[in-house]
Amino acid sequence: MNLRLLPSWLAAGLSAALCAPAPLPAQSIVIPGTGQRVEEVGDDFEDPEWKIDLVLPKSSSNIDNDQRLPAAMSANQRLYESTYRGVPDVVVRIPTPPGGLPGSTGALKLRTLHSGIPGRFSREIQQDDLLMNISHRMGGYIPAAWRPSFVVRVCMPPFDRWEKRSGSSFGVRADCEGTKWNDSVGRRLLVSRRLQPQTESFWPGMFIQFNRQADGHEKDHAVILIRCDEKGRDIVGPKIERPGWWTLGMSVSADGRVHYFASPGVNNLTIRDHIGSYTPYNMPVERLNTFFFNVVNMDDGRTWSTEWVIDDPMFYVIK
């Protein structure tokens, strides 16, 4: 193509597009838990002295731009409070519920009440976060070329003990970055146009949504929502009719796609547990900073979230 024959603004845009990094060839699906476990990251909660000191009042930067530092951190420095949203009100080690990982004696209970701005009640759905400490303990982000993945076991209580509403209750998500190419128009409109790269943060993940019979559903059940596809839409995944232990996992392949896995029980994930693969917002993942957990409730000062239990959140790479 001879760019000299095109209008200057179109030639400039095409030239920038042709020079933009080409997508890598498609890679095979990465099964979470594949490769080498990173010893510096993750936790098994086996230490009977495990604790985290909650530093109140907690952050609500997502609502009022107030981080309220310092943030809470576990004594072993493996989990910490987000400075974007606060930490759940209950983060405590408990004996592993029945049916958990063989040999496990400890797990982590997560529950929240005041998920919005401290001292105020929004009477809307809010959420708190608990983050795994990856970038600090490893000295930086994890490139997609390392094909990172993580796995966690999650214990769901019987449906009659869930928060009395339909909607999202819990999330497992990744903190990722990619490059977004934006149009940039010069000083004189349509005289000079080029594509400008901009680093963008986004948070793909899986939410567990409760659907109550009392709210018009055929019967109490939950579903896994995948966030998100190339157009930013949530995708409805497996239906959960029997709560209890589930194994959830996510991975990133070298081409920037995110792969989602879920399986009832606590067995290692296999390709049979694959529930979807997407390039979120059509923006390939280039870096993974951490993964984290959301606990969601109605922020009215009275309604506790569903009680969630997690065990053995572990992180893996293939180098």
Image: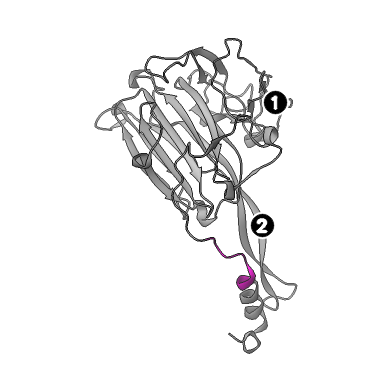
307 left or right of 184 in image: left
What residue is disc 2 on? 198
The residue positioned 46% from the left and 22% from the top of the image is 308
- Quadrant in the rendering for residue 2: bottom right
Q: Is residue 96 above or below residue 284?
A: above
What residue is disc 1 on? 71
Q: Position of residue 246 (x, y in %)?
A: 39, 28
Asked if the stretch drawn in magenta spans residue 20, the answer is yes
Asked if the stretch drawn in magenta spans residue 300, the answer is no
Residue type of the residue flagged with mark 1:
Ala
Please give the range of residues in magenta.
17-24
137 left or right of 156 in image: right
Q: Counting residues from the N terminus, which is met first, the one under dot 1 or under dot 2? A: 1
Which is nearer the eye, 104 or 156?
104
The residue positioned 62% from the left and 56% from the top of the image is 179
Residue type of the residue flagged with mark 2:
Gln
The residue positioned 54% from the left and 54% from the top of the image is 284
Q: Position of residue 240 (x, y in %)?
A: 32, 31
The residue positioned 41% from the left and 39% from the top of the image is 261
